[in-house]
Image (spheres, rainbow, N blue to C red):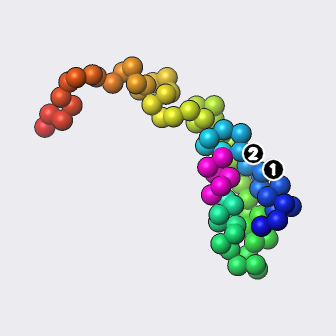
Amino acid sequence: MNQRVARELRKICNPCDPVSKRVYRRLKKQYTRLPHYAKRDFLNLLKETTFDMDPKQSGGILDQEKGGREDLPVGEDNNKG
């Protein structure tokens, strides 16, 4: 992978938060594993795909407003069956 391809991938999926950084790393890894004749099609497919991240996705799952850490019961037996 050269700088031109890395720049294109950053333009498609801007790695600004932890989630988008993981997506960017995964895209780089997938691109490098492709054979040379499929790389152009991969970039064209990514350009057609949109990567709209919600602000809620930037934090962890437990840090969201509903179902946060504060709502978890402490010291109770949750495995009642």
| Residue at the disc numbered 1 | 11
- Residue 14 tag number: 2
The residue nearer to you, when weighing 23 against 48, is 23
Q: In which quarter of the image is residue 77?
A: top left
Work out whether residue 41 can be spotted: no
Q: Give the range drawn in magenta.
A: 21-26
Q: Do the residues labelled 2 and 1 touch (CB within 8 Å)?
A: yes
The secondary element bearing badge 2 is classed as loop
Work out whether residue 1 can be spotted: yes
Q: Can you give x and y, in whole percent of width and height, for residue 10 in the image?
A: 78, 51
Q: Residue at x 48, y 34 (%)?
A: 61
Q: Residue at x 83, y 55 (%)?
A: 7
- Residue 34 tag number: none
Q: Quadrant of residue 66?
A: top left
Q: Which residue is drawn at 73% across and 49% down?
A: 13
**Residue type at numbered disc 1:** Lys
Please give left or right for residue 45 compared with residue 22 in the image: right
> What is the spatial separation of the Cα atoms under label 2 and label 1, in whole angstroms?
6 Å
The residue nearer to you, when weighing 40 against 63, is 63
Q: Is residue 25 magenta?
A: yes
**Residue type at numbered disc 2:** Asn
Q: Can you give x and y, in whole percent of width and height, for residue 46 in the image?
A: 73, 59
Looking at the rendering, in which quadrant would you find the C terminus? top left
Please give left or right for residue 12 compared with residue 74 in the image: right
